[in-house]
Amino acid sequence: MSFISYLVNGISLGSVYAIIALGYTMVYGIAKMLNFAHGDVIMIGGYVAFLTVSGMGLPPVLGVLISMVVCTVLGVTIEKIAYKPLRMASPLAVLITAIGVSYLLQNIALLLFGASPKAFTSMVSVPAIVLADGQLTISGETIVTIVACIVIMIGLNLFIKKSKAGRAMLAVSEDKGAAQLMGINVNGTIALTFAIGSALAAIAGVLLCSAYPTLTPYTGSMPGIKAFVAAVFGGIGSIPGAFLGGILLGVIENLSKAYISSQMADAIVFGVLIVVLLVRPTGILGKNIREKV
Amino acid sequence: MAMLEVKDLKVHYGMIEAIKGIDFEVNKGEVVALIGANGAGKTTILHTVSGLLQPSSGTVTFEGKDITKMPGHKIVSLGMAHVPEGRRVFAQLSVYENLLMGAYTRKDKQEIQETLDMVYTRFPRLEERKTQLAGTLSGGEQQMLAMGRALMSHPSIILMDEPSMGLSPIFVNEIFKIIEDVSSMGTTVLLVEQNAKKALDIANRAYVLETGKIVLSGDADKLKNDDAVKKAYLGE
Ligand SMILES: Nc1ncnc2c1ncn2[C@@H]1O[C@H](COP(=O)(O)OP(=O)(O)O)[C@@H](O)[C@H]1O
Ligand SMILES: [Mg+2]
């Protein structure tokens, strides 16, 4: 029974990774850059939810919505100010800028909210379910996180396949010039991608802090890196890959903690990534990169 | 006034001046060919006209409107389509989805459907393969798709960049027949070609480009009989 419990918690943690990984993978697919500040947008999302709900006493749903709006604006602003001017620059310059933005966000949070951890009260009011005569308890946070992840995945897939803006994203991710020749506003599409990724980061931030209720300016950093690993693991640029990579990573991490060693869990996670990349350099569901003639 | 007017256009890649001040025009209903050796600057000119590149000086006027500084995606809705060099179809999208991307700027579903039917009638192969991923098509089929996709925006002018490049002789003939067809339906064509002989056969007028400069221009029939053109471009 405890195995099932570890497994379910792993899937829940993995769901958070998957939601964060979506932001990495979508931005990579479209702008061909790694937005290392993405993890810190999660942290900002957590603080906004904390301030609006615990601080101002707003209902959690409203707090989450405000957090999504703030993160969306933040993500689009970062893109416009920091990344857009570098669209023709070398990938290394963009990467360094992204790392810089990450530190900037952490230090702004440090300045605004201080270094002491905030005790985040869970935003989830769904009751836990008790199964197997009380041997297995699944918390409300776990349920909400897994459901949120599934809903987001299905919604995002429908959006990309069925909507005009979604198809524009596919076109831009494949060939910006050709997309522009179709009349697609490439810059607008990139901004939209950042907006969606950042709104999802806000949701991830709230779910993460509800499950692990301490909030500091560095809260987003480690989950951000793990989610990045998940995105690479699943195949960067692939949306189902982000989902699969996130869930697998969460499960591996949780089971390692339970059965091997909690200190070693992260090492095991990264070790598995290295092995997967040695066997499949493009990740589990990654496309083989074809050379253009 | 000409439909498309390019005046004193200069384009740089960094410090390199690829286009060194050229003038040309395309009138409504014409097929105008732009011929020149590899690296002469043909693609650069088309990219600048359709807004993928910004010129360092000069103007591009389309239907009386200065589009020199207009973002490329807005130029499409003015009625200009561009079939790029190397076709550049969206390999991960189906043939049908590629064609829909071509109609991205249009709103009326009914009209889009009519254009789609027209494209399928003109390119029956595309209809046969509509659910197939574009990346799995042959080169000639991809060229047809690129042309069909451009037609989906219902353009008044189409810029075509080396549509016959890398195709088998049968497909080359088919592509040129299609260009004549498109033209006879009233669409103006600006055609860039390596295959100067075939291009001059279907064009009304032509410009000859050498390292970023126009060195010759005139009626296609006249250029076909020009000794310098014959020697340099027609292999006679
Ligand atoms: N992206 C680029 N960066 C630098 N130089 C370029 C680029 N594209 C083309 N050029 C140069 O500009 C000139 C014209 O190229 P292009 O317009 O592609 O010629 P064409 O289409 O006639 O073969 C060539 O000398 C080419 O090397
Ligand atoms: Mg060329």
Image (tube, coloured by chain):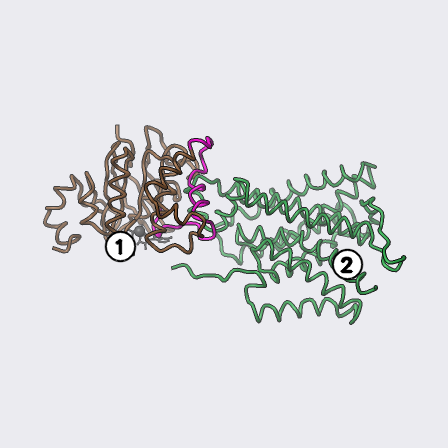
The secondary structure that dominates the magenta segment is loop
Q: In this view of the protein, which residue sits in the foreground, B213 or B3?
A: B3
* Nearest to the observer: residue A161 or residue B212: A161
Nearest to the eye among marks 2 and 1: give it: 2
Determine whether the residue tagged by mark 2 lies in a helix, strand or loop.
helix
For disc 1, the neighbor class at 10 Å (few under 14, some 14 to 19, many from 20) is few
Residue B31 in percent (x, y) is at: 24, 38
Tint applied to chain B in the drawing: brown
Disc 1 within 8 angstroms of ligand 1 (CB): yes
The answer to whether mark 2 and mark 1 are in CB contact below 8 A is: no
The vertical placement of A265 against A159, above or below, is below
Foreground: A165 or A267?
A165
Residue A138 falls in image quadrant: bottom right
The magenta stretch spans residue B209: no
Left or right, residue A112 beside residue B52: right
The amino acid at mark 2 is Val
Residue identified by numbered label 2: A8
Q: Is residue B56 visible?
A: no
Q: Which residues are magenta?
A: B84-111
Residue type, mark 1 in image? Asn
For this view, does A101 lie left or right of residue B150?
right
Which chain is green in the picture?
Answer: A
- Label number found at residue A29: none
Instruction: Name the quadrant containing residue A126.
Output: top right
> Residue B108: within the magenta?
yes
Residue A288 in view (yes/no): yes
